[in-house]
Image (cartoon, rainbow, N blue to C red):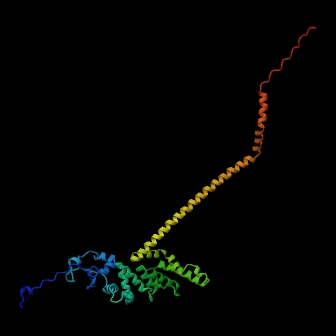
Amino acid sequence: MTTTSDDMTQKPLSPPSAVDEEYYWDFVTFSVDDVLYRLPKYRFVNGSETFASEYGLDQDQGSEEEYAGVEDSYPDAVKKLDVAAADFRALLKVLYPKTDKASHQELSLSTDEWLAVLKLSSKWRFNYVRKLAIERLSPLAGMKPSEKIRLGREYAVESWLLSGYKELVTRKAGIAKEEVPLVGWETVHELWGVREMWRSCQATCDCKEIPLRPTLDLTIQDSLRAEFDGIAESQQQYYTRQEREEYAERKAIAEREKEEAVCREAEIVRLALAEEEERKKVEELAKEVEVRRQKLSSPVTSTMKIAVNARPAADSESDVESRPSSPPPKPKRKANRKY
């Protein structure tokens, strides 16, 4: 059997005409401290709109069409990140965990690594990752109160801030001199007042009365209301999608309840005004009836009644007097009789 040259020539394989919508991933290359990292970009795109927009990952690079069937290493641009390589690696451990289980509970990161994750997730608004880092770091066991306060302020974590303040208030030792610059003079002044009030209450109040008094948490928050309000406002930018939906729902409910309260108040005012108007009408009617009663029962009114009753007889006498008198009858003349 002979083989022709045509048989020896093989036609090149045609590239596939379509790509899988779910498992044909775009890759992105980052440069951090002169170290390259090449990763599927979907975690960055889905995890943070802020990061995707800042580094142009949300733009269509045409990989599914232009580079379909070509080698996997298409010429994507290198994104340079101005962060520490160790911090970025800690973030990647959470975004691309090397574990067979989907749960992040299997992640084994040190406290410093979780703090690095918190730092970068807050910087780039990876809000789900940030929430996870806060959960894994809480309650900051072993940290000094001043460090809890610093981290709570820096990353807008209200529970950490409150925990640090509460520890300064309740511990036996007062606020140390070296802690004052870290906490702040004005804050120390407020906390000192709360501390003295709380210690006095603990020493003098009956235990049965303590639950009826404001809790220490509320007392601290009220004393530093401006700071806690600022933290609460800052936390909104770190809401996850679910938290944003829950917040929007709570806000809508609060606004609806406020409108209903305004309507109820307006109805109460309307009813009160109507009741007042009705009361005034009743009072005016009662006064009018009383005036009439007094007029009917007064002596002048009685005299007028008598005069009114006597008026027909008087009128008859006057009529008689005013009536012209008839002339007196003429005397009859006696007839002269002749005898």
Give the side of residue 311 with respect to residue 19, left or right.
Answer: right
Seen as rendered, the residue at the extreme right is 339
Quadrant for the N terminus in the image = bottom left
Q: Quadrant of residue 324?
A: top right
Residue 260 image position (x, y, % from top left): 51, 66
Q: Nearer the viewer, residue 232 or 220?
A: 232
Q: Quadrant of residue 198?
A: bottom right
Residue at the image point whose x is 63% and y is 56% from the top: 279
Residue at the image point whose x is 56% and y is 83% from the top: 199
Q: Nearer the viewer, residue 210 or 181?
A: 210
Residue 38 image position (x, y, % from top left): 26, 84
Give the side of residue 324 with respect to residue 289, left or right.
Answer: right
Q: Nearer the viewer, residue 95 or 113?
A: 95
Seen as rendered, the residue at the extreme front is 1
Quadrant for the C terminus in the image = top right
How many numbered discs sit on the rendered protein?
A: 0
Residue at the image point whose x is 40% and y is 83% from the top: 132
Q: Nearer the viewer, residue 262 or 337?
A: 337
Task: From this view, report whether residue 147 is shown above or below residue 250.
Answer: below
Residue 31 image position (x, y, % from top left): 26, 83
Residue at the image point whose x is 26% and y is 75% from the top: 60
Give the side of residue 331 with respect to residue 311, left or right.
Answer: right
Task: From this view, report whether residue 272 is shown above or below residue 185.
Answer: above
Residue 54 image position (x, y, % from top left): 30, 75
Seen as rendered, the residue at the extreme top is 339
